[in-house]
Amino acid sequence: MWLRTAAALGLGALAFAAPAAADAGPASALRAEAGAYDVTLPTGDTVHVGGEGTAVTAAAGRSPAFSVRHSGGDLYVVPDDRLADDPERYNVTALHERRRSAAPEPKASGELVTVRVRSIARDGRPGLGTAGFLNVKDASIGNAHRPLPGDPDAPCTDERWNDANCVRLVPGTYSVMGVVQTMPSWAPSTGPGKPLNYSLVGYPEIEITGDTEIVLDARKAEEVTVRTPEHATAPGLGAISHLMWTRGPANGPAVDEGVYMGDGATLEQRVFLQPTAKVRTGTFETYTRWRLEAPAITMRAGGRTLHPEYYPAAYFSDTSDQFPRLGGSAAMRVADGDEPGADLRGRLALVQREDGVPVAEQVARAAKAGARMVAVYNDKPGVNDDPGGYGTQLKVPTVRLSHEEGRAVLRGKATVTAKGITDSPYQYDLLLPEKGQISRNLNHVARTRDLARIDNAYHGDGAMTAARYSKRPWEDFALAYSRPVTGTPRTRVEYVSADPETQWSAMAITPEQPYNNAFPGPDTPHFVLGETKWSPYRAGQRIAHSWGKAPLTGGISAQSPIVRAGDQIRLRVGMTDAARNFSDAYSSSFPNGFATDFRVYRDDELIAQTAYKASGVLATTPEDAGYRVEYDFANNAPGARLSTRTKTSWTFRSAHTTDVTPLPLLQVGYDAALDLRNRTGSKTLRLTVRHQDGSSAPLRRLALQTSFDDGRTWTGVPLKNGVARLHGKGTVSLRVTAEDERGNAVAQETVRAYELR
């Protein structure tokens, strides 16, 4: 869940497997390409910044939201429970570059005025958050930040940051915007803990001519709501993932800020924006990002509609199959799970949360007594999802209720009717922008005719992890929270905001990525498959896309093509599926994982080799030469059924270039009529060959061989216009060779490509 492309997963962020130690290779081996790196924040949270996405992974036992700022070329990712800290401690770019914290900005010249800032949460109490100040004329003394409510005794300065509740500024026109948290009534309003919700409040354009106090009052903010008339949806855990805004001055760089909220970051799935006047100087935009699905769980008790929510799965599990949820409908008698000796057999056990007693312990006790399901209600007014401890799996489906709902149901002792949907057949990915100002009407209606429709097919034998990234024109980064796609193999209709200024890209991890390591299982390698490009969508547009469709073979990333600039060749090779989704794949740091060998030859001389990530920059000679790039891959994971071994060799010529020039490598495409388990009864296989650089040199040769004994013996198969008729049954292996009239060639062998019935 992009930031400079950020991918923070909701249940667990993108965590790439650590590589095995690799041989150094020849002296002129690949130099790692700049851009991808990992940084551990002082809180133990991890930020992965990459070309396709940035992943924010909360440390074990933590589930904060993250306040993010992109300013002066640096990326800041500040956990929301550390807003009072100096943000330079969380300057991801500086931490990666091992720079010292930024020096205080120079003192402003001329007369300064004192601006105090006060925050009010939606319940009228002081609110926790941050406030930012930006001169909208030229950004001078701009991008100053103060924590809310701030320290009234700290000195008031014009520094970029200190923990005071005030700032010294040159008189002028400013943007003063902040995010204010509203805490539960039973929690300190500015203390630690999980907020109910967030509000973006303030003034994107305000004249400051003298000493003044600015009040950021969340009570002035209006709720953002979304209706989906064609489908029943509910804002479940992580439904609101982004609250982002940008403020650009008349002259100077814009400042982009926001809050990223994953599953469990807030107790309510609500967000509020304060309406504003239209800005007259510079630019201003804010947006919220939503993911809506069929309601995961609904309940009625008598004539009363309840509002249950599952606990964040990361509290109690590593993967979706470890977290029990209700599928289908159930009518259950209510029983007091706290009453000694109560008959809980087949019933909904109501238990009251208690400080010092883990929820998992309460659930285990009720499950042992025969409860079919457990509802934990808060012991104080409102809601609470504190698990009281981590690392224990739940025994039965468990939801949380507010104190008021729990007491009412317990008094009534009624029958509760519950309905659970474990695999929503549809999903809405919505980005809702407010441009130039925040309007008073924040009630949105998402009609399918106004959206794009993507029919996604998830191939394989088990759950995947998936995420969709969005990016506005002003964003240098993007972040997506991912979630398991359970019930796979499966299809799902996904509706996406259609806007020419919003670009989208998606990814899927197979098999499902664990979001914790509380219940360690066997080490397992993963393919992190990404789409080939960023795209805007049109209203009414309909697209079909697949993930993990066989065969997985050696391939090239369309977002990072193999190019030459002068006497340097940028290389990146990994695995692609039949839809050309690309994944880096390299030797695992554990046995029974991936094993790879990547080699580059110039005129048959080995000049680079690595078992590590096949991505980097190769310094070479200016003369025209023949090159051969070879990539061998083996998947030794227990249970790996298809594409267990692949070998690919690309041959081409290259010489010095004056511009960045894509090289004419050939790529093979495979089209078999596979079902979602990568099986088919059709004997037809269509092969296509294209040039990475888009050139159209005719093919001189295209040949296919097949094997039904895992590559021990091979049989030639005739091709007519790239179409073959296969003979045999079982798991078919493929060997393809192709060459164009300029001598560019590819040879690709895939053992256990797909299953032919």
Image (cartoon, helix red, strand yellow):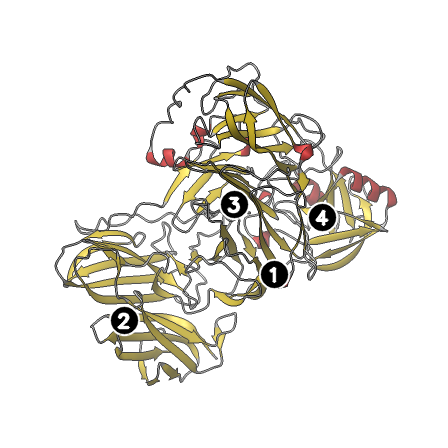
Q: What distance separates the C-alpha of mark 3 from that of mark 1?
A: 38 Å
Q: What distance separates the C-alpha of mark 4 from that of mark 2?
A: 58 Å
Q: Which residue is mark 2?
A: 747
Q: Which callout, 4 or 3, points to the residue nearer the camera?
A: 3
Callout 4: few (<14), some (14-19), or many (20+) C-alpha neighbours within 10 Å?
many
Q: Can residue 425 be seen at all in this image of the molecule?
A: no
Return the residue nearer the eye: 668 or 710: 668
Q: Which callout, 3 or 2, points to the residue nearer the camera?
A: 2
Q: Which residue is painted at 39% across and 63% down in the image? A: 576
Q: Which residue is mark 3?
A: 516
Q: Quadrant of residue 493?
A: bottom right
* Three-letter amino acid code of the residue under disc 3: Asn
Could you tell me which secondary element the residue under label 1 belongs to?
helix
Does label 4 or label 3 sit earlier along the sequence? 4
Q: Which residue is mark 1?
A: 450
Residue 277 drawn at (x, y percent): 61, 38
Q: What distance separates the C-alpha of mark 1 from that of mark 2?
A: 45 Å
* Three-letter amino acid code of the residue under disc 2: Ala
Callout 2: few (<14), some (14-19), or many (20+) C-alpha neighbours within 10 Å?
many
Does label 1 or label 4 sit earlier along the sequence? 4
Say left or right for 738 vs 298.
left
Callout 3: few (<14), some (14-19), or many (20+) C-alpha neighbours within 10 Å?
many
Residue 634 drawn at (x, y percent): 35, 62
Does label 1 or label 2 sit earlier along the sequence? 1
* Three-letter amino acid code of the residue under disc 4: Ala
Q: Which residue is mark 4?
A: 367
Q: Which callout, 3 or 1, points to the residue nearer the camera?
A: 1
Does label 3 or label 2 sit earlier along the sequence? 3
Residue 703 drawn at (x, y percent): 29, 79
Could you tell me which secondary element the residue under label 4 belongs to?
helix
